[in-house]
Image (spheres, rainbow, N blue to C red):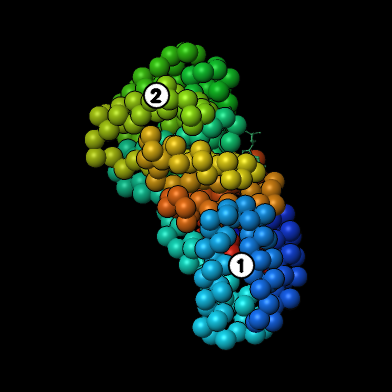
Amino acid sequence: MGFFDKIKSGLEKTKKSFSTRLNSVVAGFTGENEEFFDELEELLITSDVGAETSMEAVERLRDLVKQRGYRGSEEVRGALAEILTEMLAGSGGELKLDTKPSVILVVGVNGVGKTTTIGKLANRLTDEGKKVLLAAGDTFRAAAADQLKIWADRTGADFVRHEEGSDPAAVVFDALNAAKARGTDVVIVDTAGRLHNKSNLMNELAKIGRVITREAPGASVETLLVLDATTGQNGLNQAMEFKKTVGLTGIVLTKLDGTAKGGIVFAIVSQLGVPVRYVGVGEQADDLVPFDSGEFLEALLS
Ligand SMILES: Nc1nc2c(ncn2[C@@H]2O[C@H](COP(=O)(O)OP(=O)(O)OP(=O)(O)O)[C@@H](O)[C@H]2O)c(=O)[nH]1
Ligand SMILES: [Mg+2]
């Protein structure tokens, strides 16, 4: 199955509800009717695009339609696609992993899919011939390291863990030094799920960040926030806090296969200003797709 098909089937739920409703809203467009814009705004908001982003999109559409004198539904659909494309500009793109080692720090609240995403990333990177090391920075529960170890075994990645309850920053310290000694290409750090409003836990992440800067100076570091698409707008608040504490270079949006609310992508990119890098569309090793805004929109609007 190609990437495009994968997003398409993963997005089937989003697409069904969004494009079916979009078709009926667009069919009612005559060029004059105000209800069209209200209905469209409501459709965007209920698809988790977010109130602010939805209003902005509809305002821009209104201007464009007026400016170009559009009267037909196909014209207005094209104009909407243009606006949505613009809103996603700057998203996607490859991770910058050009030093040896490079580091990917994976953060997020509980249960969003961090560890699974790390397994999928390890799978991609080892397939590309890279030497990968997984660091079990979730020391809260022994089971968390066990879960990561399964992914290490499955993908052929190296693995570093400490005792349950130990300092995650010490795990990262050891992992980076092991990576330097072994010629590892990419170290991927798992972290315990944490609430974005618990400052002691957020400070722990900042400490991990400092260890990375100190032990691997000049290394390329990607800090990825994993967001569960099914949590909708609440995910945006989480993202703001993580961005403030650790800085973010990208978002991985998981469980897009299980929700009808893919609209969160627009809110993230336009309100947070952090690119979506990957989307998770299932639980298997190859269910991680690089985010491509063109393909995403086509899957959504076609
Ligand atoms: N359908 C679907 N399920 C996913 C996806 N990503 C992860 N999951 C599932 O979500 C559940 C939680 O995943 P984990 O990877 O353990 O999440 P986590 O963020 O590491 O959780 P904590 O370490 O407890 O904070 C598991 O059952 C995963 O299989 C996805 O893209 N789609
Ligand atoms: Mg985990």
Query: Would you say 169 lies left or right of 153 here?
Result: left
Residue at figure coordinates x 32%, y 47% from the top left: 98
Residue at figure coordinates x 55%, y 16% from the top left: 142
Image coordinates for residue 24, horizontal then vertical, percent? 75, 70
Image coordinates for residue 196, horizontal then vertical, percent? 49, 31
**Considering depth in this image, is 47 or 69 the residue closer to the camera?**
69
Image coordinates for residue 110, horizontal then vertical, percent? 57, 30
**Considering depth in this image, is 232 or 280 the residue closer to the camera?**
232
Report which residue position mark 1 lands on: 298
Image coordinates for residue 113, horizontal then vertical, percent? 58, 36
User: What amino acid is at disc 1?
Assistant: Glu
Residue at figure coordinates x 62%, y 52% from the top left: 48
**Considering depth in this image, is 225 or 57 the residue closer to the camera?**
57
First-in-chain label (1 vs 2):
2
**Contact (Cβ within 8 Å) of mark 1 with mark 2:** no
| Mark 1, other Cα within 10 Å: few <14 / some 14–19 / many ≥20 | some
User: What amino acid is at disc 2?
Assistant: Glu
Residue at figure coordinates x 47%, y 25% from the top left: 198
Q: Which mark is residue 204?
A: 2
- Indicate whether 107 appears above or below 91: above
Does the image show residue 120?
A: no
Q: Secondary structure at mark 2?
A: helix
Q: Secondary structure at mark 1?
A: helix
Give the quarter of the figure containing the N terminus: bottom right
Does the image show residue 245?
A: yes
